[in-house]
Amino acid sequence: MLPLGLLNAAQGHPMLVELKNGETLNGHLIQCDTWMNLTLKEVIQTSPEADKFVRLPEVYVKGNNTNSRTSRAPSGAGAAAMVKDVATTAEGEGIEGGVEDAVKAEGEAEAVVLEKAAIAKMLRQLGLQKEHGTSPSDDGYVKKTDGARAQYIKRVAKRSPWVPEPLFHGPDALTERLDTVPTRTIYEALRELQNIEDSYGSVVRLVEYLVEERGEQPNELLYECLIRANVDPKHGSAEVAGSLVKEMIEKGIQTSPRIYQALLEVTAVHPDYILRSSALRDMKNRWYSPNLDGLTSIIVGLLRDGQYELALEKLEELYKSAATNPPWLYHIFVYVFGELGFHDESFQILQHQLKVYGPNQPMMTWLFLLDVYSRDAFYPGIAYIWERMVTPGLLNPPDGTAVNVLNTASRHGDAPLVTSVMRLLTGRDRRLDLHHYEALIDAHTLRHEVRKAFTVLCIMRRAGLAPDSSSTRSIYRMLRESPSATDEALSVLQELRQQYQVPIAAFNVVLEATVLHHGFKRAFDLYRAVRRICADDGPDLRTFHVLLRRCALRKSMNFLLDEMQTFGVRPDREAYDQLIRICALQDDYEPAFKYLERMTRSSGGSVGEAAAAGSGWWMSRASALALARCCVHAQDARVRFIMDECRRRGMSIDADVRRLVERAQKEKQQQQQQDEQEGGKEEEVTPRVQEPSALSRLVAAMSS
């Protein structure tokens, strides 16, 4: 026998005791007195030949009846269970007889009639309708179990060797031999079936068999088995479980903590806020406290109910208690909160898991969190998981997740993380495209790293990619904030041209920022250095767009047109539009109509044909108004042509032109009155009838 001090410390833990007659008792030690007399609960008694097994609620063992050489306290903690008080001796036959008498006494003490409607309702949950005289196998519930299920049943039967294995398959598998199975063995099978997956039909049928065939009186255990069977996600029902508890109360059967524990487990799978609250209220009134399984069932039920804040609060309370939280409970929170987008909370739970249980978390949890964090651009979680799992090579995310991480890191200016993602993709022989490099450029610009941003542009050029203006928008946002950054960018280009082939997109963005900060003249001077900086590319259409937008002199415009012709750059719609605008600023605006004609011809067809088809190039509203203003001041009737063409394209400028005409007419009248007043001082002018001017005719035509 173990020392008395060790026995006292082992109270509440599993204990294996060998009796002098060779039998063994395996149960939970709940009491040990000075004479080493032991009281065990939830005991499994094994015969000396190991061919008989009996499960006993409680056993009292005298200290002088144990084998001192083999009694030991197994490691691990058992599950607490509510049992009946049954005292017995240590003799084998006496134990078996005492158990049988105890079962009979239990049935007589609770002699009430079990409502057949309850079992019938549970059978209907299976889609069955049993008739008198039909065999259990005729009702359609028997299922063909696959290999995995069969292996699972074998493992369960191996853990409970005193129960015949066919009982775990349900009474249908033991129809012909069920009458030879002892009643207590069926009870033991019911206890084991409560913890087995997909055992709803087996439990209901065994209870039905005990009541109808064996004449067993209903008792707490039968009701508990029926209630706990409703945990089944497919056939179970919280409504049925609640009706069973109500039936117990009506029939005067005592409800134990195990009944309420089963109710909490049912509501965890089939959410029912009212039933859960009622069970908790009854437990409080009876001074019952939920055990660890009950608390976890409450939390899971709240999650299923959508009461996420309350569930998280209960989880915190459980953590602060003395109980040890099961790791799977945290995993449920991580998956639920991650899918719902509660990323701050899921990230905190993940960090808590690592602190309590260590870094050995399931890989699927890491991969799931990285996927949802990257999907919703949750940067703190992405950076944490990437550094902890991906960088060391422990996790290998798919390409889609990697691209999401790339974009999130780019928006937060994390250039090292962007570089790490690009290295991962290239390691898979993936070809890096424009959007990969542009993400790295964006990350550098957020950190105001001018040289690195332009270096990436040069690397893109070396990789055979052609960056355009869309690739440099983040650089332009950085340069427009500071003139000094623009000057620094120009010096960086001068240095990079000695090591790389500088793409024209890099020159264009610096030219664009120069126009913004220093004006057209400075930018025009910078343009003259384009052949020196971009020797291989030369200016493109974007280069001339930047300059033409700020150009106002015909001389500069003509120079740019000559440059475009030299480099073989053909004007597009925007270039023609700027040329028309510049010509409209001059006294001689006639070239504007020449460029307008070229614009329409370049788009295919004449002006009238393009307008009639609703397609083709046409000048912008600002350029059209500028040209119309010239026509109004010059009393040019072609303003009507401009108005008609704009109207056909859905860009009406009639109201603006009318105001221009009225203003010009008023200015002309004021000028005539002033001239008449000055001439009237010297001589009286004979009034004469004047012919209507072109401006007057234009006003009349617009009024009509």
Image: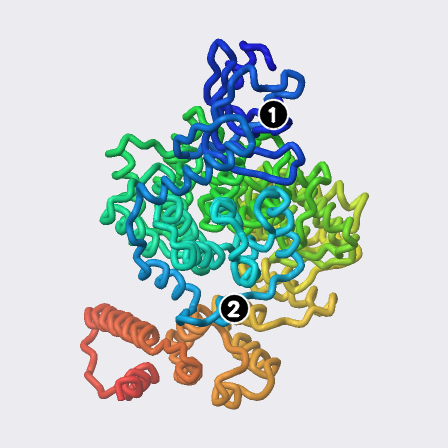
Q: Residue at x 34, y 40 (%)?
A: 310
Please name whichever residue, 453 or 690, is drawn nearer the observer in this view of the structure.
Answer: 453
Which residue is tagged 1? 74
Q: Is residue 309 visible?
A: no
Query: Which numbered mark, 2 or 1, is in the foreground of this view?
Result: 2
Distance of mark 2 from mark 1, alpha carbons? 43 Å
Q: Residue at x 78, y 49 (%)?
A: 427
> Residue 642 location, x and y as percent?
43, 81
Q: Which residue is drawn at 37% across and 34% down?
A: 290
Please name whichever residue, 256 or 279, is drawn nearer the observer in this view of the structure.
Answer: 256
Kindly indicate whether the residue at mark 1 contacts the one at mark 2 (C-beta within 8 angstroms): no
Residues packed near mark 1 inside 10 Å, few (<14), some (14 to 19) or many (20 plus) = some
Is 29 on the left or on the right of 463, as rendered?
left
Query: Which amino acid type is shown beneath numbered disc 1?
Result: Pro
Which residue is tagged 2? 137
> Residue 391 location, x and y as percent?
70, 38
Residues packed near mark 2 inside 10 Å, few (<14), some (14 to 19) or many (20 plus) = few
